[in-house]
Image: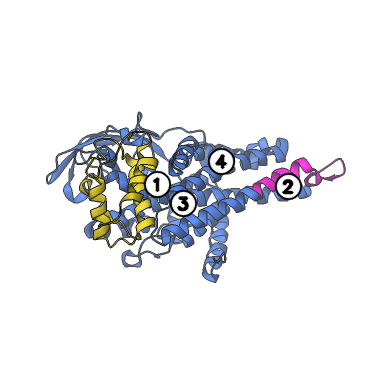
Chain colours: A yellow, B blue
Amino acid sequence: MQDDTKLIEFIKTDLARGKVTGTLGSSDDLIESEILDSLGIMKLILFLESNYAVKISDDDLTLENFSSIMSINSLIEKKGAKP
Amino acid sequence: MNFSLTDTQLLQWDSIVEFSRRELNAEVRENDQLGNFPLANWQKCADMGLLSLLTPEAYGGLGEDLVSTVHSIEALSYGCEDSGLVHAIVTQLCCIVLINLYGSEAQKQQYLRKLSSGELIAAQSITEPDAGSDVLSMRTKVEGDGAVHSLSGGKVFISNGPLADLVIVFAKCSAGKSAFGDISCFLVEKGAPGYSMGKPLQKMGLRTLQNCEMFFDEVSVPDQMMLGKNGHGMFIFNEAIEWERALMTASHLGTIERVLEKSIGYVKTRKQFGKEIGKNQAIANKIGTMKVNLELGKLILYKMAWLKDQGKRATLEASLGKLFVSESLKSACLDAIQIHGGYGYMQECDLERDLRDSVAATIYSGTSEMQRNIIARMLGL
C-alpha cells in the first residue's frame, strides 16, 4: 500500500483549491465533489507520472481509476509505482 | 543537453526553404486578396513530403519525430510567405497525428496514406458559436452507444472546413462525467447525409486558409468511425492541442525569422540624415527585441517537441510557447511595418499581410488570456 500523504496534499492544495475544508477521505468521490475538473485531471496525471515513475496510458483513463484517492492509489500500485 | 541539430535536419531546412521560395510565393498577394486556397501549392507541399512528416513509415509517411517536424515547419514558414497555406498544412498534420494516436487499424489504413499524399484534406471540428475558450461546454451532441451514433449540432471557424474530405468532430456524449468532459470524437466524411457547411468565412487575415461553419443534422455515424474510446474526447482534445500548439509555434517562429531578416536587410540599406537607419538606437532596439523573442521562442518550442518525443506530456510548455511566440509574432510584424515606414504600410511590401495574418495567432488554439490561465493553474494557483 502506498503512503498517500503526498497524493492527498497535492489534491488538497493544487486541485481542490478551497473545495476541501476538512479531511479528505480516501474513498471520497473526487469527481462528484468537483475536486477534479478537466485541467485538474491533466495535472493529476502529470503529478502521478513524475512522482511515482509510472506511465498513465489511454487505457487507464477511466472514471473508476480516478474517482477517489483509494482508486488512484490502486492504479499506481498496479502500474508499479516507485515513490 | 545537446542543442545541435543533425546534418539531416540542417539539410532538410535548406531544401524546404529553397523549395518554398521557388514554388510557393508566386501569387500569394493575389490569392490573399481573392481569398483563394492554392490547391496546386498544397499538392506541391504534399509531393515534397510536408504532409507526411508525422505519418509512420508503415502508412507511407516519413515517420519523423516532433523535433525534426517542427524544424521543417519552421523552415516552411520561413520560406513560404503564404501563412494561410502553412496553417492549412499544420491543421492536416494535427489530424494525421490524432488518427495515428487514437485511430483503429482500419481507420489508419483507410485514411493516413491518403491524408499524407494530399489526396484527402482533413479538418478538426471543435469550436462552436457558444463554446470557444470554454470548449467543454460544446452543445453538438452524439446519441446512441450502439452500432450507430447520431450526431447533431453546429461548429464554427473550422480551418480547412470548406475543402475537407474528412472531419474529426468532437461532440458531447452520455458516456462520461464532467471531469472527463463527456466528449467523444468521430470521423465524418464529406457527403454524409445530414452534414453540411456554410460558405467560406471572410477574414481579416489568413485569407488563403479556408474556414467555415459546419452543421450536423442527425448525421448517422457508425461505431467504427469513433476515434478513440467513447467519452475520451477530452483527453484526445488535450493531446491534440499540445501537438497543435507545437506546430503552430513552429510556423510562427519561421515567420518571425523571415520578418526579422527582411527588416535587417531594410535598415542596412535605407538611409536617412546621411546614415543607415539601423544605426539609430530606436530602430536597432526593435530588431534586437525580435531576435531575443525568436531565440527564446526556439528554446521553448524545441523543449516542448523534445518532451513529446520522449512520450512525456507538455501541457505547461505548450501554453508557454504558444503564448510567448504568438504575442512575439504580432509584435514583430507591427515593428517591422514601423521600421519600413510608409513602404511597410503598402500592400506590395507584404508586411501588412503578415501583420493581418499574425493577429489570429493570439486567438486560435487558445487565446493568450486562456494560456495565462492555464499557466497559472499549472503552477498551482
- Which segment did they paint magenta? B271-291
The Cα–Cα distance between marks 3 and 2, rounded to whole angstroms, is 30 Å
Viewer-nearest of discs 3 and 2:
3
Tell me: B153 left or right of B351.
left
Local packing at callout 1 (Cα closer than 10 Å; few below 14, some 14-19, many 20+) is some
Name which of mark 4 and mark 3 comes first in the sequence. 3
Judged by depth in the image, the label closer to the viewer, 1 or 2, is 1
Measured as percent of width and height from the top left, residue B73 is found at 50, 55
Q: Earlier in the sequence, mark 4 or mark 2?
A: 2
Label placed on residue B327: 4
**Residues at marks 4 and 3 on the same chain:** yes
In the image, is residue B4 above or below residue B356?
A: below
Going by the numbered disc 1, the residue's amino acid type is Ile
Q: Disc 3 vs disc 2: Cβ atoms closer than 8 Å?
A: no
Q: Is residue B327 magenta?
A: no
Mark 1 or mark 2: which comes first in sequence? 1
Residue name at image x 54 percent, y 37 percent: B359
C-alpha separation, residue under disc 1 versus residue under disc 2: 37 Å
Return the residue found at the far left.
B146
Chain letter of disc 2? B
Q: Residues within 10 Å of mark 4 (few under 14, many from 20)?
A: some
Q: Is residue B274 magenta?
A: yes
Q: Amino acid at mark 4?
A: Glu
Residue that badge 2 annotates: B266
Query: Counting residues from the N terminus, which is met first, the one under dot 1 or under dot 4?
Result: 1
Percent x, y of residue B92: 39, 51
In the picture of the structure, the residue carrying the numbered disc 1 is: B241
Q: CA distance from mark 3 to mark 1?
A: 8 Å
Instruction: Confirm or deny contact between disc 4 and disc 2 (CB under 8 A).
Output: no
Sequence order check: which comes first, mark 3 or mark 1? 1
Q: Amino acid at mark 2?
A: Tyr
> Which residue in the structure is indicated by mark 3?
B246
